[in-house]
Image (cartoon, rainbow, N blue to C red):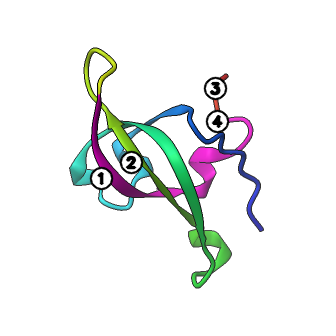
């Protein structure tokens, strides 16, 4: 159903279109937790990422939860 690989502690740069609330804009997130959302059809696969926003200069900002398309986290989409 899901083919994602998320490394805890890594920084993921998420585009606005990959987020459930795209009006919040793109964000960089240092991931501290992951939760799958399984109560939706497979074509609407979403993943909750928990972590800290990464601010300009690399400082950590607020702790947030971001609902992200699972397809944005496919093995091909994750950059080393």
Do callouts 4 and 3 mark residues in contact (Cβ within 8 Å)? yes
The CA span between labels 2 and 3 is 18 Å
Q: Sequence order check: which comes first, mark 2 or mark 3? A: 2
Identify which residue is drawn at 57% across, 81% down.
40
The residue to which callout 1 is attached is 22
Identify which residue is drawn at 64% across, 36% down.
77
Do callouts 2 and 1 mark residues in contact (Cβ within 8 Å)? yes
Q: Residues within 10 Å of mark 4 (few under 14, many from 20)?
A: few
The residue to which callout 3 is attached is 79
Q: Sequence order check: which comes first, mark 3 or mark 1? A: 1
Which tag is nearer the camera, tag 2 or tag 3?
3
The CA span between labels 3 and 1 is 21 Å
The CA span between labels 4 and 2 is 14 Å
The residue to which callout 4 is attached is 77
Name the image quarter holding residue 45: bottom right
Q: Sequence order check: which comes first, mark 4 or mark 2? A: 2
The residue to which callout 2 is attached is 17
């Amino acid at each position: 159903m899901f083919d994602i690989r998320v490394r805890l502690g890594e920084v993921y740069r998420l585009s606005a279109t990959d987020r459930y609330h795209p009006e919040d804009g793109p964000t960089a997130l240092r991931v501290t937790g992951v939760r799958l959302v399984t109560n939706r059809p497979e074509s609407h696969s979403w993943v909750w990422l928990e972590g800290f926003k990464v601010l300009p200069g690399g400082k950590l900002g607020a702790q947030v939860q971001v609902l992200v398309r699972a397809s944005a986290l496919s093995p091909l989409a994750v950059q080393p």
